[in-house]
Amino acid sequence: MSSILIRQLDDETKRRLRVRAAHRGHSMEHEAREILRQALASDRTPGVHFVDEIRRRIAPLGGVDLPVIPRGPIPDPPELDQ
């Protein structure tokens, strides 16, 4: 397991964490882990794919028909022997 250090935690937040932990019979460290676990478990929104976001922004402007560029066979790589 990993550890983190939280710096510059204001006194009121620390006091409230201490009181909450005491009410539940936990240490402050255990209570902080539970708070983080619950907060992150409920934050499982799927990310938006970059291409989908571009399409969403462009759609109101209308479509653009681009020509299809014919593809040929892939050329052989150049010979670098000297």
Image: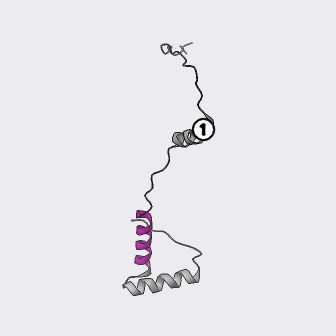
For residue 1, side relative to residue 77 (left or right) = left
Q: Position of residue 46 (x, y in %)?
A: 45, 52
Q: Position of residue 36 (x, y in %)?
A: 44, 69
Name the residue: 41% across, 87% down. Answer: 22
Q: How is the image coloured?
A: one colour
Q: Nearer the viewer, residue 21 or 60?
A: 60
Which amino acid type is marked by label 1?
Ile
- Which secondary structure, mark 1? helix
Q: Quick check: is 60 in the magenta stretch?
A: no
Crowdedness near tag 1: few (<14), some (14–19) or many (≥20) residues, C-alpha within 10 Å: few
Q: Quick check: is 39 in the magenta stretch?
A: yes
Q: Quadrant of residue 29?
A: bottom left
Name the residue: 54% across, 80% down. Answer: 13
Name the residue: 40% across, 73% down. Answer: 34
Q: Quadrant of the C terminus?
A: top right
User: Which residue bears the numbered disc 1?
Assistant: 58
Above or below, 67 relative to 13:
above
Q: In the image, which residues are magenta?
A: 29-44
Name the residue: 40% across, 87% down. Answer: 23
Q: Quadrant of residue 66?
A: top right
Q: Residue furthest right?
A: 61
Q: Nearer the viewer, residue 42 or 8?
A: 42
Above or below, 66 relative to 13:
above
Q: Position of residue 28 (x, y in %)?
A: 44, 80
